[in-house]
Amino acid sequence: MQAIIDFFKNESDNTLVEFLKTALVTLIVMVLVVNIINLIFKSVEKSAARRGAHPTAAKILKYILLGLVYIAAFAEIISAIPALGNFLKTLLAGSGIAAVIITVAAQEPIGNLVSGLLIFASKPFKAGDIIRYVEKDISGVVEEINLRHTVIRTFENKRFIVPNNTFNKYPIENANYNGDKICMLLDFAITYESDAVLAMQIISDVVVMHPDFCDNRTYADITNGMPPVRTAVVKFSESAVIIRAWIWAANMGASISLKSDVLLGVQLRFAEAGIRIAYPHTTVIIDKEK
């Protein structure tokens, strides 16, 4: 800072004019280049949107180019001040020490940058995927992936901003990885007095009749007589028989409405058939003689 003050105090008017000209020209060029980059990548992003693709790669490349432009402009302006220019040259000459200092200071940002590039390259998830951040139990749609962080839009329409290097430390559940189909496991608890076979048939009928149900059977499964909905008794609890249904939906969005409608439909059909849904209760027997 003192070098800058001394420069403006001691240098001649011509030197100051040259510095201002250099700074002004550099800023004008920087603004023009930035605008050109933004226009080019805006066109690229629109083209990707028309093809149904998300422009994640274009955004990452744009951020890298803009960062290089800003760094180059800053270095050009700084080098116009002799004292700071010499300091910059000295700093670059001792690049080994400078690299260590910069690496330590920027460890977290560099980690996020590298992780962002790895996410782009390996594609564990992409924009538009429905994921669950297991560590924090946060679920939502991937809205944006940039060099520093990933933005997840939760189902409550809130934005959860996660640094990219976090994804290398904890598991991520991706509902859209290698396919959009979702298999839900729904458990139904009925009393021991109820007809379990009839209950499983009712569950299957309700699921199959729903428009969002997805028949995931292969041709071989159908040929071998496998039912469209798998149901089974999976547990005897203290007061209930637990029946589990494996229910497939085309995607996460369809699975939400499917689950809600199936639960309501099964409850109504159980009531009509006399099948009782179990709940915790206590039976008290009073011995009148005592």
Image: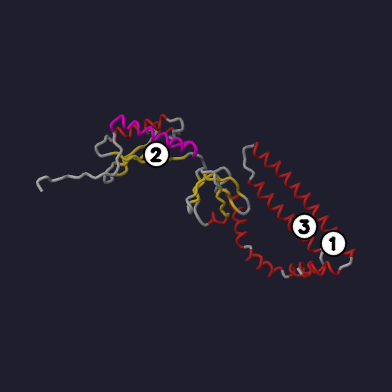
Q: Nearer the viewer, mark 1 or mark 3?
A: 1
Query: Which of the two labelled residues, at mark 2 and mark 1, occupies the earlier sequence position?
Result: 1
Residue 170, magenta (yes or no): no
Secondary structure under tag 2 reads: strand
Side of 290 relative to 28 (left or right): left
- Give the mark nearest the N terminus, 2 or 3: 3
Image location (x, y in percent) of residue 27: 79, 54
Q: Nearer the viewer, residue 235 or 16?
A: 16
| Front position among marks 2 and 1 | 1
Queried whether the magenta region covers residue 255, the answer comes back as yes
Residue type beneath disc 3: Ala
Q: CA distance from mark 2 to mark 1?
A: 73 Å
Tell me the number on the disc at residue 73: 3
**Left or right of residue 3: residue 225:** left
Q: Residue at x 57, y 51 (%)?
A: 161
Q: Is residue 113 above or below residue 240?
A: below
Cβ–Cβ under 8 Å for marks 2 and 1: no
Query: Residue 47: which quarter of the image?
Result: top right
The residue singled out by tag 1 in the image is 19
Query: How many marks are shown on the rendered structure?
Result: 3
- For the record, the magenta segment spans 245-274
